[in-house]
Image (cartoon, helix red, strand yellow):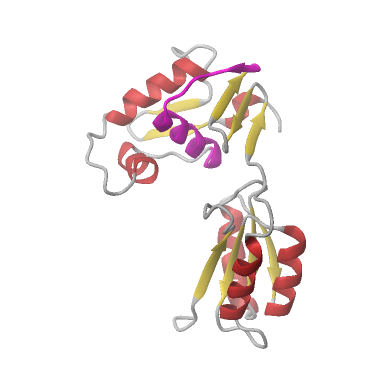
């Protein structure tokens, strides 16, 4: 496995990862590796579709447009390099799906950077929006301040970890029913913060 290489192909129309259905398409001819990768992806909440050959990959990806393709470069027949080239060649001909999140009283349009709570528009700063987007995409897992700075602000950001607290408080005032008793963005004392999507009701 150490000599095998994989490529990640994302929608090239706007060069961003798209997670509309959180579906990852895994292209790997070795069953053991495929099972291992699928296990970890599913543990992170992704739906996984699979293919064993480049030919099958091209057929399925063009038909289904998954959020992301995880591609083994050393495939039999059409190798991963050629599969990746063909996918990128045709990606620009297909409009990128409109990316939204909607559950209960919360609706987020990731393309227009708009947030609605109980159908009312809620103005957010870019940073607060990115923080909310991160939380709803990674629910129920606890992140400490340093992790959030690295994952939302970026690894090269030079700000105090307590900056996260300021943005959390501001975000709660905008989206929680009662920011003094938050239900969606929760504090895990001594650890960090997590997003509780169950507070929004069933999907």
* Above or below 101: residue 125: above
* Above or below 55: residue 39: above
Pick the residue in front: 88 or 108.
88
Can residue 53 be seen in the rendering of this structure?
no
Query: Which residue extends farthest bottom?
Result: 77
Residue name at image x 26 percent, y 29 percent: 162
Residue name at image x 53 percent, y 32 percent: 113
Occupied quadrant, residue 30: bottom right
Pick the residue in front: 181 or 111.
111
- Location of residue 81 in the rendering, given as x and y in whole percent from the top left corner: 56, 79
Occupied quadrant, residue 110: top right
* Above or below 16: residue 61: below
Give the extent of the magenta segment: 118-139
Can residue 183 be seen in the rendering of this structure?
yes
- Location of residue 187 in the rendering, given as x and y in whole percent from the top left corner: 41, 27
Occupied quadrant, residue 136: top right
Number of numbered discs overlaid on the protein picture: 0
- Horizontal side, residue 54 vs residue 165: left or right: right
Pick the residue in front: 122 or 203.
122
Residue name at image x 66 percent, y 42 percent: 98
Residue 24 on the magenta span? no
Residue 135 on the magenta span? yes
Residue name at image x 71 percent, y 30 percent: 202
- Horizontal side, residue 136 vs residue 47: left or right: left
Pick the residue in front: 194 or 20.
20
The quarter of the image holding the C terminus is top right
- Location of residue 122 in the rendering, given as x and y in whole percent from the top left corner: 53, 19
- Location of residue 144 in the rendering, given as x and y in whole percent from the top left corner: 35, 38
């Amino acid at each position: 496995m150490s000599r095998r290489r994989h490529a990640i192909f994302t929608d090239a129309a706007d060069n961003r990862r798209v997670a509309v259905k959180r579906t990852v398409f895994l292209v790997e001819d070795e069953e053991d590796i495929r099972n291992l990768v699928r296990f970890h992806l599913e543990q992170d909440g992704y739906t996984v579709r699979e293919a064993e050959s480049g030919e099958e990959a091209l057929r399925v990806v063009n038909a289904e447009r998954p959020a992301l393709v995880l591609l083994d470069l050393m495939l039999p027949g059409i190798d991963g390099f050629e599969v990746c080239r063909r996918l990128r060649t045709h990606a620009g001909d297909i409009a990128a799906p409109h990316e939204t999140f909607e559950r209960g009283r919360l609706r987020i349009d990731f393309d227009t950077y708009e947030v609605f709570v109980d159908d009312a528009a809620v103005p957010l700063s870019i940073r607060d929006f990115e923080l909310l987007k991160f939380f709803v995409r990674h629910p129920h897992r606890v992140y400490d301040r340093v992790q959030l700075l690295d994952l939302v602000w970026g690894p090269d950001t030079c700000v105090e970890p307590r900056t996260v607290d300021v943005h959390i408080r501001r975000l709660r005032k905008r989206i929680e029913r009662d920011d003094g008793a938050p239900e969606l963005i929760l504090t895990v004392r001594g650890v960090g913060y997590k997003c509780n999507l169950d507070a929004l009701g069933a999907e």
